[in-house]
Each structure stands twice: as C-alpha cells, then as structure tokens.
Image (cartoon, rainbow, N blue to C red):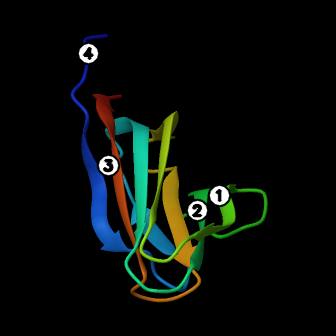
C-alpha cells in the first residue's frame, strides 16, 4: 500500500453540547485517524466525550474519551492510528458547553 498524505478529515468545528457526528465517512473508503486536536476557546474549563460507533452515538462502552476536561484557553492533542471503516464507523462527540470546544481531525484515506 503506497504512503498516504495526512489530510484534514473534519473541522475545525465546534463540538455540540448534544451528541452529534463529528466525522462521517464515505462508504467507499476507510480512514486512519492520526491526530485529533481539541481547543477550548473560552475562559472556563470544559469537558468533552468522543465516541466511535453508531451515527450521533453516545452509548456507554463506545467512548474514545469520556468526560475529559480541557483547561480554559488551552488544547489537547491526541495522536494514534484509529481505523474508521466505510459508512459503519462514526466519530461523534458531545461537549459540556456549546461553542466552547473546537475539534480538528486529521488522517489518511484509503479506497476499500
């Protein structure tokens, strides 16, 4: 398999304060998430949870991150190799406050 270029898969966009999809993929590809950046753009700490699974999901046992706090005017970076397959794996999330956390997802795409 040839080397792929890292590209932006989602965002920058606010994480909603109700469970919502952050990234939905095409059924003809799979993606390897390499980097997730979450920035708190407010003067107060805010928590977030991310989930891998059903669309708009927030079911227990599907958390990638659960109730992680991001300090005021700070950020969190996460590096990994998370495979999201076709139109069956969704990356969804929820923040403790609306319009507070901005998420950007980067990775590689491959044709199935």
Gap in angstroms between the C-alphas marked 2 and 3? 20 Å
Q: Earlier in the sequence, mark 2 or mark 3?
A: 3
Q: Which residue is mark 3?
A: 26
Task: Name the residue that disc number 2 marks.
Answer: 50
Return the mark for residue 65.
Answer: 1
Which is closer to the viewer, label 3 or label 4? 4
> Residue 88 at what x, y percent from top left?
51, 50
The image shows residue 18 at horizontal and vertical percentages of 55, 85
Q: Which residue is mark 4?
A: 3
Q: Earlier in the sequence, mark 2 or mark 1?
A: 2
The structure residue drawn at horizontal position 45% and vertical position 86%, both measured from the top left corner, is 43
Dot placed on the residue nearer the N-terminal end, 3 or 1: 3
Residue 33 vs residue 44, the one in the foreground: 44
Taking depth in this image into account, of 67 and 53 the one nearest to the observer is 67
The mark that comes first in sequence, 4 or 1, is 4
Q: Residue 41: percent from the left, percent from the top?
A: 37, 78
């Amino acid at each position: 398999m040839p080397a792929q270029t890292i590209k932006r898969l989602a965002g920058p966009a606010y994480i909603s304060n109700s469970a919502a999809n952050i990234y939905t993929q095409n059924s003809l590809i799979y993606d390897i998430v390499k980097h997730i950046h979450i920035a708190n753009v407010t003067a107060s700490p805010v928590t977030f949870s991310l989930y891998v699974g059903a669309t708009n999901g927030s079911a227990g046992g599907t958390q990638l991150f659960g109730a992680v706090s991001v300090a005021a005017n700070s950020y969190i970076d996460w590096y990994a190799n998370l495979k999201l397959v076709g139109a069956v794996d969704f990356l969804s999330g929820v923040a403790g406050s609306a319009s507070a956390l901005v998420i950007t997802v980067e990775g590689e795409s491959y044709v199935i």
